[in-house]
Image: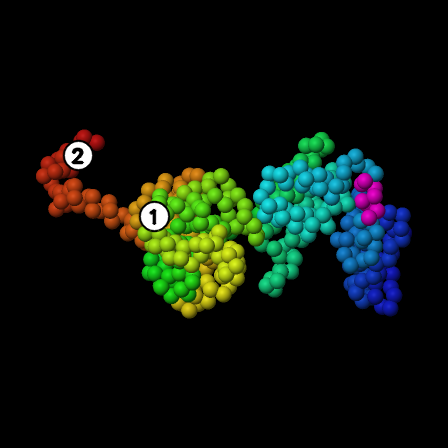
Amino acid sequence: MASVNVRADKLFFDFRYKGKRCREYTKLNDTPANQKRAKQILERIEAEITLDTFDYARYFPKSKRVADFQNHALRIDRLNSDSPTFAEFSAIWFSETEVSWRNSHKDNVALTLRKYLCPAFGDMPLDQITKAQLLAFRANLTKIPRKNGNTGLSPARINKIMMPLRQILNEGAERYQYSSPFRGIKTLKLQKSHIEPFSFEDVHRIIATVRADFKNYYTTRFFTGMRTGEIDGLMWKYVDFERREILIRETWVMGQMEYTKNDGSQREIQISQPVYDALLAQREATGEYTYVFCNRLGSPLSHNNITRRVWYPLLRYLGLNKRRPYQTRHTAATLWLAAGESPEWIARQMGHTTTEMLFKVYSRYVPNLTRADGSAFERLLTQQFPNNALNAETNNPLANISPSQGAEND
């Protein structure tokens, strides 16, 4: 029978679980209050064992018995299941699906499986994984130590880890005819990210101050709205000086050329005069190489290195807020809007299939740049109704009706 005992003035539990005698020691001193508390805990343990809901690791997470009972449970589950383990099926799923992925995405999924998913679920039969286990796994991701000293992965990172897990379990549920444990589990809500584009004055200061060997690079970034991988992977064969266009066909991702982010990213960017002049000057420096912006060996620039050694020091020197280089893309969009360019044209330049993203992300910056704050409507009213003619009595059809007449009409 289960009991609370004492050894060296410390309380410990003595009970049986799955046919084994278990002794788990506590740090509680032998006092009447602690005796009462320990007995209450033991009563809950016995009740949960009876109901088959007892989780050894929840009560005694540091116990050596945890691994024994987990392995025992896995053996029982495998005997009662006809489906493969998570590790076995995830390998099948990966081999069947990778043909549709970009290389960078394939590497990210492989890393997620290797680092997070297989260690947590690898030996478990696919149809024995429960919703509670998925939620517990996700909760544990919020407690993982990070390099910057903080604890827990970001909601965005957690969602990316959970995505292949969801796909694997849903596919397994369809193949082996069981209900997916992911049903009802929603992605974590992300905080809205705010963009911080540069003003015309800031852009001028940056281009005027940056190192001479990067002046053409940042001029092109600011006035084309190209993504980092697109400009870093830009090849001379995609620069059409005659038609004054940059053809976006490939992108540089994780050290290799790949297809663009999606089909909509395949586009032609019209070259403005500053960009045209910058590319002509750049051709004098790197025209013999394949890539427009490259190092001395002709290889694409390392954006992490450039950001750390050129971009951030420049912003500090100019007294500007620290911002990712991607803000140059946001800057291009807001400047185009400020100039009065067609939203449809801007969306095409940015590689957006519709204007929805344009208005959703950038529209709030337009009033500060164009004075589009209601003053245009004021000017229209002034033109159509000079000298406040709208309110003049001669133009008011009700001006000659007395208050009493108005009441009778009502």
Separation (CA) of disc 2 from disc 1: 49 Å
| Amino acid at pointer 2 | Gly
Whether the residues at callouts 2 and 1 have beta carbons within 8 Å, the answer is no
Give 317 or 156, whichever is nearer the viewer.
317
Q: Which mark is residue 142?
A: none
User: Is 5 placed left or right of 113 in the picture?
Assistant: right
Main SS class of the magenta portion in the image: helix
Identified at 68% across, 32% down, the residue is 174
Indicate whether 306 appears above or below 79. below
Identified at 18% across, 31% down, the residue is 408
Q: Marks 2 and 1: which is nearer the front? A: 1
Image spot of residue 305 (x, y percent) = 52, 62
Q: Which residues are magenta?
A: 71-78
Mark 2 lies on a secondary structure that is helix
Indicate whether 94 appears above or below 236. above
Image spot of residue 2 (x, y percent) = 87, 53
* Residue at the disc numbered 2: 406
